[in-house]
Structure formats: C-alpha cells, structure tokens
Image (cartoon, rainbow, N blue to C red):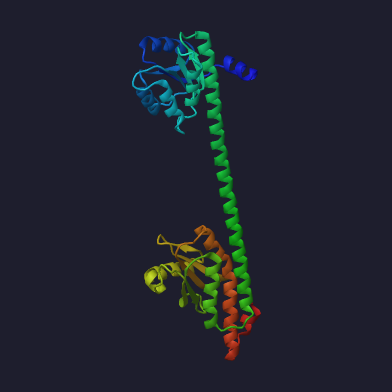
C-alpha cells in the first residue's frame, strides 16, 4: 500500500476529470484545482447530464456530488457501476453527509472513495492521483490482455496453418503411394483413368477433375475421364466448365508445360515425366480447406506418378495385344 501511495503521489499522470455538481461555484473551484494539476476537465450540472457526458467522452475519474436534483449521486453511481462499459471508472463521491448509513449507501452504489465538503485541496489532489493511478493500471492491464489475445490468436493461426500443411502432406503421400501401387496392378488404361482422378481428388480436396492424355507426338490431347463429386453441382462436368475454357487452358498447359489458371477458378496441370508430357489434369471447384496454389503444386508433384501409371497401363494393354514397345520398357 505504501508503495502505491508513493507512486501515485509522485508520478505525474495525465487524465480527464468529470466534475458533477449542481452548484456552479463548486464546479469552478474543482475545475481550477484539477487544471492546476495538469488534468483536463469536463462538467455536468446534474445526474442525467453526467450520464450523457460519460457516453460522449468517457472520463478517467469522476468527482460526483451526492445531493443533486433530478438524479442524485447515488443513482448516477449505481448506473455507471452497473454497466460493463463504465464500471471501471473510479468515482469519488463528494458530500457533506457524514452519517455511517450514507457512506454505506455510497459503497453499495459502487463508489471508490469519498471526499467531504468543504473540499480539502491537498486531500482531493492525492485521492484523485490515487484514482488515476488505479485507472491507469486498469487500462494497462486491458491493453496487455488485448496484446496477449492478439499473440495467442496469431500463434493459433500459425498452428492451424502448420496442422493444415501437415494434413496436406499426409494426403499427398497417401495419394502418391496409392498411385505407386496402381503402377504394379497391371490394369488397363480404361480402368486406370477413373482411379487416377479419384486418387487426385482425395489428395487435394478438389471435386471436379478432367483427365486428358496426349498422343504419341505430345502435341494434342484427348479427354479420357471426368469426375464430379460436388453435391451442389451434380451436373455433368462439361456443363460446369465451358468447353472453350477447357480447350484454352489445356492447350496452353500442353504447350508451355506449366500450370495455367483462369479467373473462373479452373486450372490445368501438365503431367510430365522426364520433360515429356503425358497429359493434362483440369481441375475446377473450390479447394476446400487448402490454399489453391498449394493444391496445384501438389497435383504438379503427383503428376510424375500419374505419368508412370499411364505408361504402365499402356504397356499392360500392349502386352495383351502383343504390341510391346521395347524402347518404352527400357525408358521406364
């Protein structure tokens, strides 16, 4: 307690003091005293006006007379202390009442301290400084809590991002493992197309995909399979993605061998193996829970496994029809 009194009586603090008294001469006296200490002041001539002043410009300390017309100081104090927006403002009640019952009424109303009339300048100055010190501590605590909440929120956000990245990595690894096993199953091309799209869709949470495969020259594409998992848009995928948009995106991806995107949310990802293009994956629909660019990068990385699956399926078909290409086998 001694330390607090020492700090509050020696440290110069700024503050806005609301003076509430129905007597103008009393308000002027307190105004001069408070301004001599470097404080800003505001005034109210009755209880209702006091509440209005607080709503307009919240003070740091309130010097509140008890005996006033319309609304006495006890009621003003009760209302201010009853609101979470103003309960923290220190209220010093100024009164000529000395009865114990009156003081208890003020305490029950929420008064933080009392000053007796006639006002003692030195006592008033010290009590206002103590009240300001308490208010400043409260403000600092609120500021610290807000800063702490912001840090916690930022760290939580980073943890969520890290958790999301980890989930993405797990899904990607599971998808690449599934594609690697698919290479060894000896399925035909027709059976493989749908499995590829299903695996990619699960790996990146995309709902609408189209698979194109390139011809032997690598200069043209053929659409071989589509997948639409959207319950909101269960229509055929060709009804959701305009054919001219499909052709434009896939053609550029085929030529540039780079990921291509448009403003409609579609993207084309080339399927490459040793710089040779095996096809293009066209995706549409939102990337639920993932960043779109990372989704496309995952598909780009998985493209190598997709290219190998297509090669192995093509070789499987050739074996069944005695059309084995030895050069292709040696280049696996």
Instruction: Give the answer, above or below, for where 255 lies relative to 103.
Output: below
Left or right: 160 in relation to 42: right
Q: Residue at x 59, y 77 (%)?
A: 309
Instruction: Please state the horizontal and vertical placement of residue 40, each as a whole percent of the image.
Output: 44, 17
Residue furthest bottom as drawn:
322
The x, y position of residue 276, in whole percent, is 56, 72
Q: Is residue 78 at all visible to an observer of this figure? A: yes
> Image height check: is 300 above or below 124?
below
Residue 119: x, y in percent?
Answer: 47, 9
Specify whether residue 275 is in view.
no
Quarter of the image where the N terminus is located: top right
- Residue 243 image point, x, y percent: 38, 72
Residue plotted at (62% across, 81% down): 185
- Along the line of sight, the residue nearer the viewer: 291 or 88: 88
Q: How many marks?
A: 0
**125 vs 330: above or below:** above
**Left or right, 152 with reference to 119:** right
Residue at 61% across / 77% down in the picture? 182
Q: Residue at x 52, y 19 (%)?
A: 113
Q: Quadrant of the C terminus?
A: bottom right
Q: Is residue 140 shown above or below 8?
A: below
């Amino acid at each position: 307690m001694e330390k607090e009194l020492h700090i509050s009586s020696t440290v110069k603090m700024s503050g806005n003091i609301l003076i509430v008294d129905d007597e103008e001469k009393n308000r002027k006296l307190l105004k001069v005293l408070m301004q001599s200490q470097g404080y800003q002041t505001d005034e109210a001539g009755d209880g209702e006006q006091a509440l209005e002043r607080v709503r307009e410009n919240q003070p740091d300390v309130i010097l509140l007379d008890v005996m006033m017309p319309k609304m006495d100081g006890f009621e003003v104090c009760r209302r201010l202390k009853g609101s979470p927006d103003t309960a923290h403002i220190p209220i010093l009640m100024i009164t000529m009442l000395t009865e114990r019952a009156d003081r208890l009424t003020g305490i029950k109303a929420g008064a933080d301290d009392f000053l007796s009339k006639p006002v003692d300048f030195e006592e008033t100055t010290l009590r206002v400084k103590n009240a300001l010190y308490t208010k400043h501590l409260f403000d600092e605590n609120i500021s610290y809590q807000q800063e702490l909440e912001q840090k916690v929120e930022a760290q939580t956000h980073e943890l969520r991002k890290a958790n999301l990245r980890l989930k993405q990595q797990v899904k990607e690894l599971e998808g690449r493992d599934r594609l690697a096993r698919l290479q060894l199953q000896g399925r035909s091309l027709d059976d493989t197309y749908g499995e590829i799209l299903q695996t990619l869709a699960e790996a990146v949470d995309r709902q609408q995909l189209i698979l194109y495969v390139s011809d032997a020259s690598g200069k043209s594409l053929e659409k071989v399979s589509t997948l639409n998992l959207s319950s909101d848009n269960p229509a055929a995928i060709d009804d959701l993605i305009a054919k001219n948009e499909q052709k434009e995106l896939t053609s550029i991806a085929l030529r540039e061998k780079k990921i291509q995107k448009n403003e409609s949310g579609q993207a084309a990802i080339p399927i490459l193996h040793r710089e040779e293009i095996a096809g293009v994956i066209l995706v549409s629909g939102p990337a639920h829970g993932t960043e779109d660019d990372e989704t496309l990068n995952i598909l780009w990385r998985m493209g190598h496994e997709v290219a190998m699956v297509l090669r192995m399926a093509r070789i499987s078909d050739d074996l069944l029809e005695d059309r084995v290409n030895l050069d292709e086998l040696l280049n696996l």
